[in-house]
Amino acid sequence: MTKIIIFISGKGSNMEAILNECKNGILRGIAEPVLVFSDKENAPGLQIAKNNNINTEIISAKGKKRQNFDNEVIDLLSNYTFDYIILAGYMRILSDGFVKTYKDKIINIHPADTQLHQGLHAYEWAFENKMSETKITVHYVNEGVDTGKIIAQKIVDLKECKTLEEVEKKGLAAEHKFYSETLGTVFSQ
Ligand code: GAR
């Protein structure tokens, strides 16, 4: 069984999908969530994790230097046994020290092709540029921002989407399925 820690900063819909797949879906018997971690005390996803009886931990990043904050997180994680850190809407850039500590063990999902768009607001970018599709990317995290080795990509057709809300809704629904499918493949290797 692959033990995972899920990192969130916000609503945690990808986290929720992964928890569901671990309980009753394609990650059942494959992955076990041991912790949900957030850098935001008020992240709505924390309550969802609690409702699923998953242990949660919070360290606020407010006013802290990136490396100092990440060292606190490393200290916290040293209390847990786990195989992978799964970023699910974790909206912080990780320090080099953090990435080196968990080399090849951090996986992220990004709403666009990371070769075309990095960082925040990928659905806004796709919508504003009137893109006919986006390519959701699951990738390993390296020292850059969304520059790590691509594990898998999924094309989402956006031609019918008239508003940003429709783009986000369709994209997120695809993310929810695709992230767990991809993780299942990685964990079964
Ligand atoms: C998701 O669309 C995820 O791909 C994106 O933030 C959203 C989080 O939603 N991540 C990034 O943009 C990372 N660069 P969620 O909290 O409901 O899973």
Image (tube, rainbow, N blue to C red):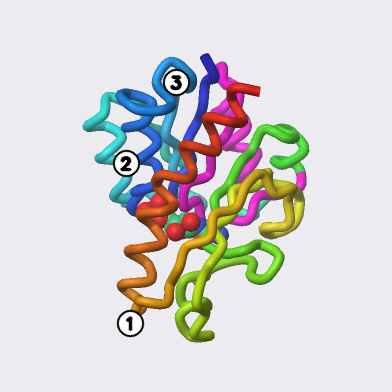
Q: Is residue 36 magenta?
A: no
Kind of residue indicated by mark 3: Glu
In contact (CB < 8 Å): disc 1 and disc 3:
no
Q: Which residues, given as a range, are shown in magenta?
A: 68-96
- Decide: is 68 above or below 161: above
Label 2 Cα neighbours within 10 Å, binned few <14 / some 14-19 / many ≥20: many
Q: Position of residue 140 (x, y in %)?
A: 68, 44
How far apart are labels 1 and 3 at the CA level?
Answer: 38 Å
Q: Is residue 91 magenta?
A: yes
Q: Tell me the SS state at disc 1.
A: loop
First in sequence: mark 1 vs mark 2: 2
- Decide: is 47 above or below 189: below
Kind of residue indicated by mark 1: Lys
Q: Determine which residue is flagged by label 3.
A: 32
Numbered disc in front, either 1 or 2: 1
Q: Determine which residue is flagged by label 1.
A: 162
Q: Position of residue 36 (x, y in %)?
A: 42, 34
How far apart are labels 1 and 2 at the CA level?
Answer: 32 Å
- Decide: is 23 above or below 130: above
In contact (CB < 8 Å): disc 1 and disc 2:
no
